[in-house]
Image (cartoon, coloured by chain):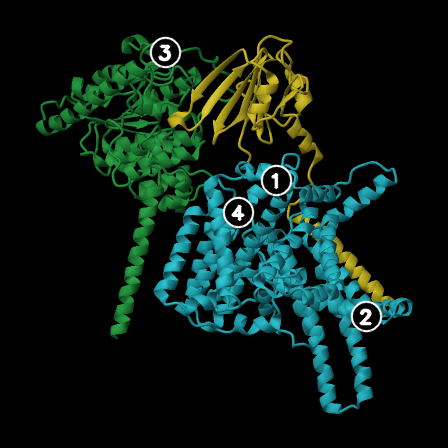
Amino acid sequence: MRKSGKYLTAAILAVSMAVTPITSYGFGWSKTEAAGEKKEESCAFKTGDTVISMGAEAAPILKALGKAKSTFEQDSCAYQGKSRIYTYENFELGTSTASGKECVESVYISGGSGTAATQEGVQTGSKKEDVIKAYGKDYKEDFGTLRYTLGNCQLSFYMTNGAVDAIEYVLVPVK
Amino acid sequence: MALVSYGFGFFCAVLLLLYYIVPGRFQWRILLAASVLFYGFAGPLWILYPAASSVSVWYLARKIGSMTDQYRNWVQKDQPDRTQKKAYNQRLKARQKRFLILGLLLNFGILAVLKYTNFLLSNVEGILHLAGISGEMEYADWVLPLGISYYTFQSMGYLIDVYQRKYDPEKSLLRTALFVFYFPQLTVGPISRFDRLKEELYSPHRFSMDRLAAGGQRVLWGYFKKLVVADRIGPAASMITGSPEIYGGVYALLGIAGHVIQLYADFSGGIDIILGISEMFGIHLPENFDRPFSSRSLAEFWRRWHMTLMQWFREYIFFPVSTSQAARKLSAAAGRLAGKKAAGKVPVYLASLTVWSVTGIWHGASWNWVLWGLANCVFMLLSQELSGLFRSLQSRFPFTDGRGYQCFQKVRTFFVFCLPWMFIYYPAAEVFPRLLGILKGEGLLSLMLGGYGTLMDTPDLMILGLGILFMALAGQICGNEGLKERLSRLPWPVSYGLSFVLFLILLVTGVYGRGYEASQFIYNRF
Amino acid sequence: MKRKKINALFVLLAAAISLLVLWAVQRLLVPKYMGMVVEGNLTGEYYKEVPDHDVLILGNCEAYENISPAVLWREFGISSYIRGNANQLMAQSYYLLEDALKYEVPGVVVLSVSSMTNFSQDNESYNRMTLDGMRWSPSKWKAIQATKMEDEHVIEYIFPLLRFHSRWKELEKEDFTYFWDRGTVSHNGYYMRADIRPAGEFPAARRRSDYSFDPRCWDYLEKIRLLCEEKGISLILMKAPALYPAWYDQWDQQIARYAADHGLLYINCMKEPEAIGIDFSHDTYDGGIHMNVYGAEKVARFLGPELLKVPGVSDRRQEEALAVRWEEKCRVYDEKKAEQEEEFSRLGYLKQFYQGQ
């Protein structure tokens, strides 16, 4: 093959290679955003060494947490599952059982200042500015509550007089 | 649109109706429209990929074809002598080759970029880490267009055939497009040859109840293999290979064997569905399996497994590589060093290693897959080298002619086929320790005392066992004849009765619906 | 010609046998709901009734577990039926009402409002229990379309075998016993429990970030109201007595405002504990979440006078045909109640609903 032919072939090869990733951007595919991944991790509640993620299997978490102060259990309608709320020192852990598997459904933190905190350091008594600093401005505000949706988790900060008085993690279906 | 979905069943039913209502000359156009729609279900812009392939292949094939026509016209008109013809042909071939290479680069280029970019990046990352440069690559999260491996290979085979003047190119762009991405083939193949498919693909077909019934029976058989056997054994096999710390020793072999059975039932089941659907349209696609588990050697196994892909590799990689200049030079060098026998083997070895490396990388973008391919290659070459020894042993021991020995050979072939899969399901460094564990028989007692109960409940185990037995029996009974021919010899009430029973078993025990995850066909991912 | 006719006959025979076998297999594999979970039969039992009811009660478990139709008849002469089911959604209540109105037009519809708190189903089993028993009609089709979950398919409702085929591994004696006929599990839609589990402690009600009801729930509430208005039916909104989950004041206010805006009667039983006479240490079978038969009878006694105030609803105990039917119903009701009371006093639990805890 002549040199000019080789150069032409190489150029076409390079163009065709380049075109493909560009078309992928055109179709709306994009690389995974590292920031998004970081946000997913921050929606797990951590107490001591135990990380509680929404939707996670409850058994190992309950084992790690030890005996709860109290446990409330409710059968779902027509015995299609069980809901439980385990009350610990600083928080409540809610689970639901379906198809024989108990999974984490919610974590609720309330009480006076200096108790349980989120992984970003927000706790009851924190100010609204602290919440926004830790989690950003991508929230919804209803009835004085700041709500963040992060992957399969909804993180709500209930405010009274400008200060957090309850924090809730709730499992939400991912669409 | 998944093959295992209600939507696909509805799609095919409506399409069949439409196909036989329209006049015959519109039928292939209906199939093309259906293929576009099928592809577009994932998102309308996806169609650009096979469309680009179709347009490039059509244009380049026509270009090559028109040059060949010019040559033929010149020969007819000017009546040149042999020397003139040879010179013209050489110049012509060189020009045609440019268009061929352009087509190959464009189409394989797209496939390579989409499928192997992350593989390349991971290797670069590995090299940088070895050089002491830390950091992480940002990997692409592109999704492969449906069937890209299959339609790329099929269309490139067509382009190469036109270049080699095996047949004339198709003039119509739309007909070329139908050949490239005829929808039944997009999911798991098979890879067809244009000259063998074109007659039936473009010609009109009259409605035939027999053909519909035969196709329907084949589709049913395919879904049985997929939903009753493959999707039932898959999770259990995955449990074993996914928890190596729990399931060691002989469990590893059980897991791999389970995956192989899953792979066969899944892949051949998918092929049966596709061939059955296509048959209902009056189009006979090539067979992809010929009872591979009745093979007595690994080489025979690979002649009966994924036949169309292996034929493609044989025709477009093995023969060209083995007859290439590089191979000839290496052969001559080997001849000088080690004699005539070595000279004869070098092209075969070179071509085999090339084919099996490519086979491995076609299946998956990782070095594990290359190891898998090379392991198969090594086993077959070793078997070839030892064939003389085997023949002399067999001549000394008469029992090797008997059915018992043949049975042993089949079982041996099955396990030899299983072994390279260990590179896929376990890290490469763990393969040999796991092999040792198997040979030592670790965990055998636990397995025999009911350890399998942790993998599958008894009713499912029974159905799985019966399903595998049924598949084996069907293969034995049908033999070389094939399912369709065997069933066609039965009176229709018996044939219908068998089909209905199969349908009922599939309906009741199939792994589909609530509680079961819709399992994609394994070879769809390639 | 003769051969063609014989062939055609064989084809028809083969088709008929195939359909029969498929029908039988489907009938065998669909759940019979005659064990611990009986709710799956509630919707279908309505069609066994002579459609002559003054009051239709709609809603989820707060409807079918908390009001006794037997007491409504016996003490007030009101003929009633509860078209309720486990986790029955507002949309499903609407379509069940639409369905019922093909057979009768009651004077009153009592709608339990607790299902305003969620529009989407959280467990596919509830959809199957509520909808499978409905007779095929445009109402059923629309109910399925409105409430099916993402991974549900309409074809699985048309051919339940596709949904329940995996039960081949779980077949029990009752699948064969009740192959042809399932009997009746409810008392005019009422789910009877005569066991007692006193109310205990509940977790404190959590604050919510959002107290608004899903707009789609409002849509269906409005549809129910308009349908009742069109047919000349009085609509009463009701919140049953239940200690858990919490019925927030904010929710209560929204319903009360809606009722006031449209001239509807809204009864929040949680605000009338003394009037109803509920004793949560006795009148509940699950610790205060649902009423048992004693509580349900008290709620019925409380509702009765309110219902009689509605024009078109009257004491019909003098109507002979109706009285004869209800006498039989009450006999069965009393028998069942006595049976459960005896079992509970003997065992401390009811075997049918015992989970081994």
Label 3's element?
loop
Residue picked out by circle 3: C198
Q: Is residue B4 at all visible to an observer of this figure?
A: no
Q: CA distance from mark 1 to mark 2?
A: 46 Å
Looking at the rendered image, the disc whose residue lies closer to the viewer, 1 or 4, is 1
Looking at the rendered image, the disc whose residue lies closer to the viewer, 3 or 2, is 2
Q: CA distance from mark 1 to mark 4?
A: 25 Å
Label 4's element?
helix
Front one among B151 and C7 = C7
Q: Chain of mark 4?
A: B
Q: Position of residue B341 (x, y in %)?
A: 83, 70
Mark number, residue B444: 1
What colour do you see for chain B? Answer: cyan
Residue picked out by circle 2: B344
Q: Relative to residue A150, is residue B482 depicted above or below?
A: below
The three-letter code of the residue at mark 2 reads Gly
Front one among C168 and B16 = C168
Q: Position of residue B59 (x, y in %)?
A: 68, 69
Front one among C206 and A129 = C206
Q: Residue at x 31, y 22 (%)?
A: C65
Mark number, residue B231: 4
Q: Earlier in the sequence, mark 2 or mark 4?
A: 4
For label 3, the crowd category at 10 Å Cα-Cα, with few meaning under 14, some 14 to 19 and many 20 or more, is: some
What colour do you see for chain C? Answer: green
Q: CA distance from mark 2 to mark 4?
A: 46 Å
Residue extending furthest toward the right: B336
Do callouts 3 and 2 mark residues in contact (Cβ within 8 Å)? no
Label 2's element?
helix
What colour do you see for chain A? Answer: yellow
Q: Position of residue B484 (x, y in %)?
A: 47, 66
Question: Is disc 2 in the same subunit as disc 4?
Answer: yes
The three-letter code of the residue at mark 4 reads Asp
